[in-house]
Image (tube, coloured by chain):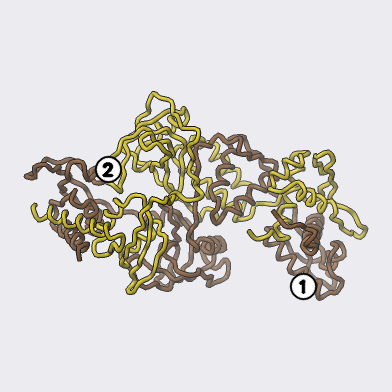
Amino acid sequence: MYPDREGEPMSRRKTERLLSLVVCLLSTRRYLTAEQIRQAVAGYPEHSEAFKRMFERDKEELRELGIPLETGPLTPAGHEDIGYRVQRQAYELPELRLEADEAAVLGLAARVWRSAELAEAAAGALLKLRAAGIDTEPGADPARAIEPRLATTEPAFGPLWQAVRDRRPVTFSYRAAGRSEPQARELEPWGVVNRHGRWYVAGRDRGRDAVRVFRLGRIEGDVRFCGPPGSVTVPAGTDVREVVRTWDSAPPRENTAVLRVRPGAGYGLRRYGTAAPAGDWPGWDTITVPYSETGWFADHVASFGAGVVVAEPPDLRDAVIRRLKGVLA
Amino acid sequence: MTPPTSADRLRRLLALVPYVVSRKAAGLADTAAAFGLTERELVDDLNLLWCVELRDPDPYCPIDLSYEGGEIVVSQAESIGRPLRLAVDEASALLVALRMLADVPGLEDRSALSRLIAKLETAAGEAAGPSTQVAVQVDRPAGDTAQLRDALERGRRVHLRYYVPGRDEATERDVDPMRLLVVEGRTYLEGWCRRADGVRLFRLDRVLGIELLDVAAAVPEDAQPVDVDQGLFRPSAADVHVTLEISPAGRWVAEYYPCESAEELADGWLRVRLRTPDVSWVRRLALRLGEDGRVIAPEELRARVRDDATAALAAYASG
């Protein structure tokens, strides 16, 4: 997969240096000064400014890999006042043993993100677990009869996950349902939730000082951080899943429609309806169907065309007729 | 694909040593396969590890290994004999996926799932925290899935009553179950449909009734399972190309249906193009949209939608 190393001696030397640095920092109990590290690890320049720059970059790379690099005071204090080390307890993945059935489920879970935002993270996790001695070969997978996938086609997913993870506020441009112009929003994100296959972010909308839920697919352009990591506090006891569920759930169906339905038509309504005594419409079935909101239900009924006619209530009947006339407008 | 960086390679090297250590010894070929490398690339990694030298102040080699006879043995791993802890993203990717699986109907091995979640949470420690801020909800099918599970496990044919919303029809068919797919938050049965003589997906929340038949499922050898990574919608040359214009209130259409293109028009209207093997659902969609949508092409579809609306209004006029 990777290009021939012979063509990239720089890269190889850098890998060697970083690896030596990790081993060196893990092998020490006491904090080492930068100078001691330069002495122990091959590949650092003699010149002190050049060394400092390179060492800074290396420390950053180790942190990005998730290596818990610690800084601390030196005893006895010399002319340098801080030192570095990595504690093995903080570095090492704790002992982990999996039964065969657990390992099979693990293989299934690792495939969920395939080709989505966290695919690389899932692969990285699997690599570490394999390194801990766990075998997750697909051959040993009894759950083959099921194939779950999670997609993150919304470009906002990546930055919003980072914002949630690092507790940072964000700004973005959002086009709410039915609005023609997007609006700028500033959000303290509490979590991201996938519902009916779509991603949502929930949190405190700073502009409105209230809890809001946004659909990621309606965010236009970039999501930008607008505060440092750690500056968002998720209120204790917050269940983001519940926040999104409440926001997205249909209101109770408190109204009842009486519908005439042609035989062989209207299955999508019959499923939720109850047969009622036939009225004065020979050749039609009559059903009653509960519904919550007239506008949405009128749209739904209109979609059945001449197969379904609203008998009652009048406002629903009018709304459907308006919809149908709109088609001809 | 971007070429791996030094950091990528370091990540791999830090996994490679414990991989061998935890197995006492590991074959070159197997290890290369596990890490997605060629044997030559793996040997290059092993040589790099072996070359590491520290001066403390006298030079010494912290890692000692051999791969004679195609078997890798690490005799000295110093401080990198165990893998690095899981990062937040890594722990989250697995935990979010596992909690989603716990929601999936038809996954029988719930006990293994909860044991694994508990073990990973413990192993990840603090890194497991943020994973609770990502949640995936999988739609639950209307009925219970016990019969379907049974059919899948025992390899039995089922009879389905299945609702096709595009045509507003309840259909009857015999299906030889293949797999359950969970895609875009919905659960589907993938099976060989004996009515269509092909692989079909059935959304479980549209199954009106299911009956286990006393017949063994017979999926043809050459039945092609759906490649879920390519998306569920598979374009075909026979598809009809449809152009719609939708108002701001109708923009949900562009989110709900896979559109090939979307073009902004004046006043927040949108022109979308989509392709479909069956236009009946577009006719129903156009009625639902009313003045919030217009069929632009094909002309024949535009005419049929007007006929549909005229016929429906006539039914109202006579009642």
- Mark nearer the viewer, 2 or 1: 2
Name the chain under label 2: B
Q: Callout 1 environment at 10 Å: few (<14), some (14 to 19), or many (20+)? A: few
Residue A214 in view here: no
Q: Is residue B305 left or right of residue B64?
A: left
Chain yellow in the figure, letter: B
Q: Among all residues in the image, which is located at the extreme right?
A: B58
Task: Write the residue at 54% across / 40% down.
Answer: B113
Task: Write the residue at 58% across / 36% down.
Answer: A141
Residue B210 in view here: yes
Q: Position of residue A109 (x, y in %)?
A: 55, 45
Q: Nearer the viewer, residue A260 or A77?
A: A260
Q: Position of residue A283 (x, y in %)?
A: 11, 41
**Residue B240 figure quarter:** bottom left
Q: What's the colour of chain A in the image?
A: brown
If the image is split into quadrants, where does the N terminus of chain B sit? bottom right
Local SS, label 2 = strand
Both on one chain, marks 2 and 1?
no
Q: Identify residue type, mark 2.
A: Glu
Residue bearing mark 2: B169
Residue bearing mark 1: A53
Q: Identify residue type, mark 1.
A: Arg
Q: Position of residue A75 (x, y in %)?
A: 83, 65
Q: Nearer the viewer, residue A233 or A140?
A: A140
**Residue A101 figure quarter:** top right
Residue B270, placed above or below residue B181: below
Name the chain under label 1: A
